[in-house]
Amino acid sequence: MKNNSRRDFLKSSLLTGAGLIVLPSILPGSVFGSTRANGKIQIAQIGCGRMGSGDMAGTMSHFDLCRFVAVCDLDSKRREIARTTVEDFYKKKGETNVDIKGYHDFHEVLQRKDIDAVIVSVPDHQHAFVAIQAILAGKDVYVQKPMTYSIAEAIALRTAVRARKRILQTGSQQRSQHPWETFRIASEAVRNGRIGKLQTIKVGVGLDKIKGVKPMPQTPPATFDYERWLGAAPEQPYMEFRVHPQDNHDGRPGWITTEDFGLGMITNWGAHHMDIAQWAMGMELSGPISVDGKADFMMDDVWTVHSNYHIELMYKSGVQVIMDNKFANGLMFEGTDGSVFCTRGAEKVTKSDGNAADANTGTKSLYASNPSILATRVGPEGKIWMPSQDHYRNWLESIISRKDPIAPVDQGARSLEACAVSWISMKLKRKLNWDPDKEMFIGDKEAQAMCSRKARKTEYDINLIMKKAGLV
């Protein structure tokens, strides 16, 4: 039976009972064909590192809706760990003869017609390359944040998703209630005017510190395909500290702090917090009109991203967003009638960070200048976020309903843009004017050129991939 027919069956199950999600305990495999286990959404995990392991586990827990059938990674060690993890998961549920395929090349995954959706948890510089091709192959996609590495990539991925009518969820988990309901409560309070007219948002996204190791070329491990991992990024020798640790599957990877692969905290946690900032002010489909950023960048070190930073973004509504490494990790919304602060509690961005809360909030992950600001969530205000108890389940349910998830592609692109224009201003060390409607800089060719970068090899050129698909 075709995928659309399977989805129709699941959709009818979801819609049973006055908008409530009521699923049958067993979805008979005979309804969808013998190759589909219980008619569930067939999923492949692409990228099996630290974040990929979490994404896979979080999604796999919703076994009433989905079934993992394949894993893919360029590091054979990580791939095998992921493969056995999935097999063990199903075996512990009493299954026998579980066969999870492991792949080196994600293109082979995309060729499988029995796979409905993929989770893309590769490094930032590969997000768009993998996700766009998955969309073009007819797969629905969950992609880690930031949605893409560059602004041009975000626009291309959005174009592909809308043209091919696929479902894409961005990994902005702070939009879903579990486990960080604080962001939903605070942003609803702001959006509904409970702090009066919003004036300022102060955002802290943590701070990367230099590694203290000079760049030194190494020989790539035999178990790791560094050439393909490098992808579109500039040619450079392998260094373990710029990729990921070989002997610590859970360790924080060095690519996050290497500018050719990720732009540092400004897009790492910045994508999370700027997503909430724009959501709260009603700018989730827009962006700033100007940005003025300053930062120190790591020099003569194996890592290359920014350290100290200060950024001021102005929106056409008159709201100013200030990002500074001195601020507590989280968002402080300040209005004419009060303020509200939200964070993940005492969670640290890096091991070197202090607590997320500051002197004004104590250890609270949610704080308001007046308790009444947080007292009413559902009422006559009307601006209430769509329900999303769990980010992964929300994605699965969206695949079935064919309706946008809580963090759709359009808004994921705008969250990335707010962070990327900040990075460009930091790099150029000057104030820039941005047109959120045209998604381009005004009167600054140098800044505009930094919205994209030339691929190292034509096979990684997203523009060529889009042209071949007839989308440019």
Image (cartoon, rainbow, N blue to C red):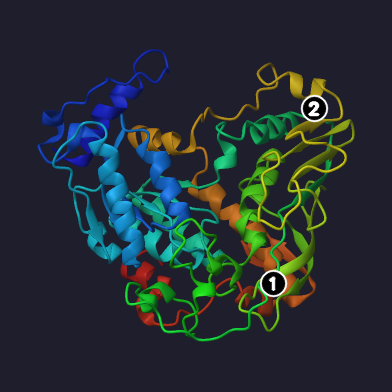
Q: Which residue is rendered at x = 79% and y = 31% of the image?
A: 367
**SS assignment at label 2:** loop
Question: Which one is closest to the eye, mark 1 or mark 2?
Answer: 1
Q: Residue furthest top?
A: 17
Q: Which residue is rendered at x = 51% and y = 56% of the image?
A: 147
Q: Earlier in the sequence, mark 1 or mark 2?
A: 2
Residue 423 location, x and y as percent? 68, 67
**Quadrant location, the N terminus:** top left
Which quadrant holds residue 68? top left
Q: Which residue is mark 2?
A: 194
Residue 330 location, x and y as percent? 73, 45
Q: Is residue 116 visible?
A: no
**SS assignment at label 1:** loop
**Quadrant location, the C terminus:** bottom left
In the displayed structure, 459 sits above or below 134; it is below
Q: Which residue is mark 1?
A: 210
Q: Is residue 79 left or right of residue 358?
A: left
The front one of 407 and 340 is: 340
Which quadrant holds residue 29? top left
Q: What is the three-letter code of the residue carrying label 2? A: Arg
Please tell me how crowded label 2 is: few (under 14), some (14-19), or many (20+) other residues with Cα within 10 Å.
many
